[in-house]
Image (spheres, rainbow, N blue to C red):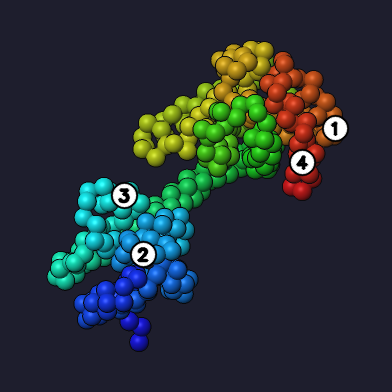
Amino acid sequence: MVSTRKKIYIVDDVPANLAIGRNLLRHFYDVYPAPSAAVLFQILEKAVPDLVLLDVDMPEMNGYEAIKIMKSDPRFKEIPVIFLTAKNDEASEMTGFDLGAADYVTKPFSGPLLLRRIANILLIEEQKHDLKDYADNLEVKVNEKTAEVFNLQNAILSTITDLVEFRDKSTGGHIYRTQCYLKELVDELIDWNEYSEELRKWDIDFFLNSAQLHDVGKIAITDLILNKPDKLNEEEFEIMKTHVTVGVEATEKIMRETKEHVFLHHALLITGAHHEKWDGSGYPAGLSGKDIPLEGRLMAIVDVYDALVSERPYKKAFPHEKACEIIEAGAGSHFDPILVDVFKKVSHKFKKIKQDF
């Protein structure tokens, strides 16, 4: 049967002191005497005790030198040390505490007092371990709860976007593909120095999942326009453009009515800004340059790319190379020039995503 008694090492170069200490403590603890600091470190390699009683005045290596080595080693730094010494001046005690000692007992010591000091230190250590275990378990529970909330949020987003795609029969797979494109674009952008400060503030998983909502406003567009087999006329296109404001209003409504809406922050910006253009000629607000949220500028590129390489009732799909030419030509007018440079680096991955899908 494994002993549940606490383990204490006594280190003293005087055999009589070791014998006295062992006889005093052996009824309460498993006690292991060590005649020098060198022997202490030998037995530390074999087993870690619950506490060390360490004499200060020893030849070859004194107690101060020994505790410095212990506290510098991750394996031993948490072991509480009580100094035993004939020195009773304040400076010596302060030196011991500064080096990390848990307590300081002067010799000759009172047996009951030493036992009480040891019991107090071991109780504090137990409480520290209990508190750490509680904190670790709490962190695990928080992480599990966070994962549950994230999965629930993602399931809701996926269900809503499935409804959008079910209605918009001409864009099958568009939402999933744009998520994949975005991941490649953002992963590459993170390696650049541009926009790094802004990206550090993002939860990238939230951003990528929120991108599913960029066309959520299409739910409000009539099927006659949404699934028209021909190119939209000017009046119909103006109605189609309202999917942006409808999507923003729907997202804002959800945010007003729930506390857990952090995951919708990116969705709001993506939904409202992915049809804005760098030169200010986009919609709905006519924003330009960096006034367009970065989320919208990223989404604009992947949204247009997927539209170009996908077949529509009113057009054939462009080859990947032609789509890249169009996007590159739009740098500085339709798209953020820096993001177009990033797109060039990963466009081959866009092609593979489209082919694999």
Residue 321 is labelled as 1
Camera-nearest label, 4 or 2:
2
Q: For the view shown, which residue lies furthest in the front direction?
A: 59
Q: Quadrant of residue 87?
A: bottom left
Name the residue located 75 percent from the left edge and 26 percent from the top edge: 341
Q: Earlier in the sequence, mark 2 or mark 3?
A: 2
Along the polypeptide, which appears first: circle 1 or circle 2? 2
Q: Position of residue 211 (x, y in %)?
A: 58, 36
* The quadrant where residue 107 appears: bottom left
Q: Work out whether mark 4 precedes mark 2 in sequence or the reverse, and give the earlier one.
A: 2
Q: Is residue 80 above or below residue 89?
A: below
Position of residue 129 relative to residue 6, above or below, is: above
Looking at the rendered structure, which numbered label has been put on residue 95?
3
Which structural element holds mark 2?
Answer: loop
- Amino acid found under the numbered disc labelled 3: Thr
* Mark in the foreground, 4 or 1: 4
Write down the residue under mark 4. Answer: 349
Residue identifier under label 2: 58
Q: Residues within 10 Å of mark 1 (few under 14, many from 20)?
A: few
Q: Nearer the viewer, mark 3 or mark 4?
A: 3
Query: In this rendering, is residue 242 above or below 67?
Result: above
Q: CA distance from mark 1 to mark 2?
A: 80 Å
Crowding around mark 3 (Cα neighbors within 10 Å: few <14, some 14 to 19, many 20+) is few
First along the sequence among labels 3 and 4: 3
The residue located at (31%, 53%) in the rendering is 96
What type is the residue that disc 2 sits on?
Answer: Met
Residue displayed at 27% across by 63% down: 84
Q: CA distance from mark 4 to mark 1?
A: 12 Å
Nearer to me, 320 or 295: 295
- Labels 2 and 3 touching (C-beta < 8 A): no
